C-alpha cells in the first residue's frame, strides 16, 4: 500500500481496516467507523485521531504511535493494543468492556475508575 494520506471527512458505516500501509503518515480527524476500526502495520503513523462511533478499536504493530486517540465516554467496546512500544497511557478508554494489551513496554497503569470489564488480558507489558 503506497497511501500517504486518507480523505479528510472519512466516514465508514461498519468496519474500517487499514492494514500494511507503511508510508501512511496521518489519518483524518475525527474518524467515524460504525462497528470497528483496525490499524495494523503502519510504520510511519505516529498519531491516531479522535475516533467517534465505534465499538471496537484494534491497533497493532504501529511502532511510532505514541498517543492513543480520545474516544470519549461513549466508547464501551473492545480495545486491543499490540506491540506499541511508546504508548504509556490508555486513560481515554475508562469505559471499555474488553481489554487486550500486549507489548506495551511503557504502559505504567490502568486508568482509575475502570469498571464493567467483561474481560482483560495483559501480556508482556513490562512497566505495568
Image (spheres, grey):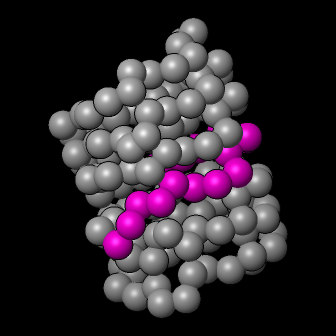
Classified by dominant secondary structure, the portion drawn in magenta counts as loop
Q: Position of residue 99 (x, y in %)?
A: 48, 68
Q: Which one is in front, 44 or 1?
A: 44
Does the segment drawn in magenta span residue 68? Answer: yes
Give the extent of the magenta segment. Answer: 58-73
Does the segment drawn in magenta span residue 120? Answer: no
Task: Give the residue drawn at x 22%, y 46%.
Answer: 34
- Looking at the image, which residue sits at the far top? 2
Residue 81 position by quadrant: bottom right
Q: Quadrant of the N terminus?
A: top right
Q: Position of residue 22 (x, y in %)?
A: 65, 21
Position above or below: 106 against 26:
below
Position above or below: 57 against 21:
below
Q: Is residue 105 left or right of residue 112?
A: right
Q: Quadrant of the C terminus?
A: bottom right
Q: Is residue 18 left or right of residue 111?
A: left
Task: Give the residue drawn at x 70%, y 58%.
Answer: 87
In the rendered picture of this protein, how many numbered marks are placed on residues?
0
Residue 61 visible in the snapshot:
no
Task: Give the residue drawn at x 44%, y 22%.
Answer: 6
Q: Position of residue 105 (x, y in %)?
A: 79, 62
Task: Give the residue drawn at x 41%, y 61%.
Answer: 71
Residue 17 visible in the snapshot:
yes
Residue 60 position by quadrant: top right
Q: Which one is in front, 3 or 97?
A: 3
- Looking at the image, which residue sits at the far left? 13
Q: Is residue 40 left or right of residue 38?
A: right
Q: Position of residue 13 (x, y in %)?
A: 18, 37
Residue 107 position by quadrant: bottom right
Amino acid at each position: 500500500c503506497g497511501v500517504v494520506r486518507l480523505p479528510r471527512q472519512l466516514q465508514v458505516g461498519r468496519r474500517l481496516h487499514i492494514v500494511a500501509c507503511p508510508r501512511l503518515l496521518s489519518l483524518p480527524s475525527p474518524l467515524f467507523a460504525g462497528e470497528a476500526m483496525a490499524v495494523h502495520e503502519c510504520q510511519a503513523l505516529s498519531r491516531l485521531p479522535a475516533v467517534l462511533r465505534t465499538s471496537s478499536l484494534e491497533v497493532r504493530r504501529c511502532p511510532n504511535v505514541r498517543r492513543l486517540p480520545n474516544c470519549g465516554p461513549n466508547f464501551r467496546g473492545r480495545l486491543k493494543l499490540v506491540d506499541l512500544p511508546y504508548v504509556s497511557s490508555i486513560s481515554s478508554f475508562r469505559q471499555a468492556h474488553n481489554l487486550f494489551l500486549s507489548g506495551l513496554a511503557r504502559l505504567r497503569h490502568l486508568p482509575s475508575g475502570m469498571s464493567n470489564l467483561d474481560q482483560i488480558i495483559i501480556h508482556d507489558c513490562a512497566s505495568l
